[in-house]
Image (cartoon, rainbow, N blue to C red):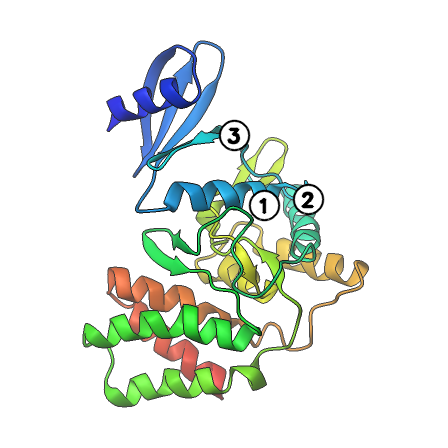
Amino acid sequence: MTRNAREAVERLHGGSVIGVRQAGGSVFLVSLTDETVIAKHGIGPGATRAEAAGLRWLGEPGDVPLPRVYEHDDEWLVMQYVPPASPSAEAAETFGRNLARLHLRGADAFGSPPPDGPADAWMGVAPMRNEPSPDWPSFYAEHRVLPYLRECADQKQFTTDEVGVFEELCGKLGELADPEPPARVHGDAWSGNVHWARDGVWLIDPAAHGGHREGDLAMLQLFGTSQLGRILGAYAEGAQDEGSPLADGWRERVPVHQLFPLLMHAAVFGGGYGRQALTAARAALR
């Protein structure tokens, strides 16, 4: 795979490669004579196209920095390398305010893919369908919760009664979720995709689509993010300043928005994610 990364960079980006190092999974750090770039191998059909479209769409307004896409084909994505740095309170607060502004850039519809992005995209190693829907509850139920619930049920992770808990929740999403216009969301904003750099916080590896902004906030909280309290506090202040404050009760709705990533992890990795998803569903229904 290292050799393939070298060939992909030379073919798609040009320049003389002097070194290739695996940075983790399908990501390679490729050193050229005058720069260093990232070469990422797509996890499945449409993955490189989806990520490239998401990076461009989220980065277009310039609110939050994202790596520049140099080029891609059906297998490889070549993009800007951003050296890491340590987290800081100042960077966290700036990121929180900028993320609020990015979300408010909006999207065509709930479930809409980024411009030029495919409907069949990916979140990590899991397939993810982006299908424009008339409202967030129908999109979230049909294209986020239920597909992964079915996979988990097929794997015998849940009893029939436990499946019924999730189905009951899907039927009540309109009552539980605050109605908002579609936001321009990252879609996979867990701590590993919050990249701390010398000039602030960058976002990487998007699963971008038109979604609910509380979804990104819930992802930030799912696995823990450095300076989380400062990020969320600055976000709330920034949203207020932009004239679109978060609706009352957004913290209590976190379990609703964490259902999708938890079920997706349960379907792909098993382990305790299914139990966490069931706990979240029951908490949301209280």
Nearer the observer, 228 or 161: 161
Q: Which of the two labelled residues, at mark 3 and mark 1, occupies the earlier sequence position?
A: 1
Q: Kindly identify which residue carries mark 3.
A: 82
Q: In this view, does 186 lie above or below 129?
A: above
Q: Which of the two labelled residues, at mark 1 and mark 2, occupies the earlier sequence position?
A: 1
Q: Quadrant of the rendered structure where residue 5 is?
A: top left
Q: Is residue 177 above or below residue 237?
A: below
Which amino acid type is shown beneath numbered disc 3? Val
Inter-mark Cα distance, 3 to 1: 18 Å
- Point out which mark residue 57 bears: 1
Q: Which of the two labelled residues, at mark 3 and mark 2, occupies the earlier sequence position?
A: 2
The picture places residue 114, in percent across and down from the top left corner, at: 54, 51
Tell me the SS state at disc 2. Answer: loop
The picture places residue 195, in percent across and down from the top left corner, at: 52, 41
Neighbourhood count class around disc 3 (C-alpha, 10 Å): few under 14, some 14–19, many 20 upward: some
Give the residue displayed 66% in from the left and 51% down from the top.
102
Give the residue displayed 53% in from the left and 71% down from the top.
254
- Point out which mark residue 63 bears: 2
Tell me the SS state at disc 3. Answer: loop
Q: Is residue 65 above or below residue 222?
A: above
Would residue 255 be visible to someone looking at this image?
Answer: no
